[in-house]
């Protein structure tokens, strides 16, 4: 079975500057994205129209919603864009890494951008399955809203068209729908983030036990852990999968004990 075609939906949360509406529409028209959704947004003005040069129809058919929930309800993958780092449950991915992943996915993908002055709120970030940061080597990490949209779409759409990249082909990779609402819906089987963090700690200990801190560059563990974290997240681990992975890691570190045996840890089952 092949996946549904990918559709990108750009969602702007409470944009205040009419000019940005136009500039975002133009960026979308440049990059071939068509669906714009505006959450509790400012009005379209002459300034918006001037900046939407060539993209006015796209701007005029933008869908307005009162809240984020109604803007992303029909999307199977929700990607939040944030200039900030580290404060959130999800570790931010570099936009190029996220883009490579997104190109393998079908269905409606929401790209969610925050307010010009204060970005996305914590509870909005919590609704995102993936958090993305555009690297900014300069001292100021916050891009203009429309520039962030342009770079996000460029990474996901335009680079996919480059022959150097492998384009997403229909059915090329069959993957679990790991960011699906079901997977994140808190069912009994799905691993909670606290257990995921403990699993990640155990795997870091396992890598150290395997000597990852004594060969290769000093960043080897960090790099490997970042990839492993992403892999675990992408895989949408269920409790049984995690118990197995805990078991592997603890056998490597020598801390595994069979359930019921004395004086050692067992694979966690909580
Ligand atoms: N001052 C705000 C930034 C708002 S910029 C803050 O500190 O969060 C408006 C929006 O553009 C952000 O909410 C985010 O969605 C996007 N954006 C700006 N710079 C970005 C960056 N470096 N990486 C990812 N998204 C960015």
Image (tube, rainbow, N blue to C red):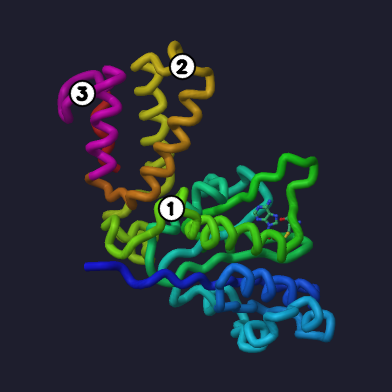
Residue at 21%, 23% in the rendered image = 257
Q: Nearer the viewer's eye, disc 3 or disc 2?
A: 2
Other residues around mark 2 within 10 Å, as few (<14) / some (14–19) / many (≥20)? few
Of pointers 3 and 2, the one earlier in the residue sequence: 2
Query: Which image quadrant for residue 169?
Result: bottom left
Q: CA distance from mark 1 to mark 2?
A: 27 Å
Near-viewer residue (44 or 191)? 44
The residue where tag 1 is placed is 101
Q: CA distance from mark 3 to mark 2?
A: 31 Å
The residue where tag 2 is placed is 216
Disc 3, SS: loop
Disc 1, SS: helix
Near-viewer residue (252 or 26)? 26
Could you tell me if the residues under marks 3 and 2 are in contact, i.e. CB atoms within 8 Å? Answer: no
Q: Quadrant of ligand 1?
A: bottom right
Residue 86 rendering spot, x and y as whole percentages: 61, 43
Near-viewer residue (67 or 151)? 151
**80 shown above or below 206:** below
């Amino acid at each position: 079975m092949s996946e549904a075609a990918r559709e990108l939906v750009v969602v702007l949360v409470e944009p205040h500057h009419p000019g940005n509406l136009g500039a975002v529409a133009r960026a979308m028209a440049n990059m071939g994205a068509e669906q714009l959704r505006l959450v509790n947004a400012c009005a379209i003005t002459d300034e918006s129209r001037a900046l939407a040069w060539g993209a006015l129809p796209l701007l005029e058919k933008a869908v307005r919603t009162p809240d984020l929930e109604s803007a992303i309800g029909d999307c199977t993958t929700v990607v939040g864009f944030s200039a900030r780092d580290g404060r959130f449950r999800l570790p931010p991915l570099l936009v190029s890494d996220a883009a490579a992943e997104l190109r393998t996915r079908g269905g409606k993908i929401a790209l969610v951008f925050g307010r010009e002055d204060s970005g996305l709120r914590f509870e909005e970030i919590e609704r995102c399955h993936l958090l993305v940061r555009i690297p900014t080597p300069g001292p100021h990490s916050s891009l203009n809203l429309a520039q962030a949209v342009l770079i996000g779409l460029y990474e996901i759409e335009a680079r996919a068209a480059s022959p150097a990249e492998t384009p997403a082909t229909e059915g090329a990779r069959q993957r679990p729908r790991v960011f699906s609402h079901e997977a994140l819906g808190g069912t009994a089987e799905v691993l909670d983030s606290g257990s995921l963090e403990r699993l990640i700690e155990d795997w870091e200990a396992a890598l150290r036990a395997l000597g990852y801190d004594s060969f290769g560059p000093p960043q080897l563990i960090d790099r490997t852990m970042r990839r492993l974290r992403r892999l675990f997240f992408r895989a949408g681990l269920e409790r049984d999968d995690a118990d197995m992975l805990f078991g592997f890691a603890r056998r490597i570190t020598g801390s595994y004990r069979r359930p019921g045996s004395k004086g050692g840890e067992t694979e966690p089952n909580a």
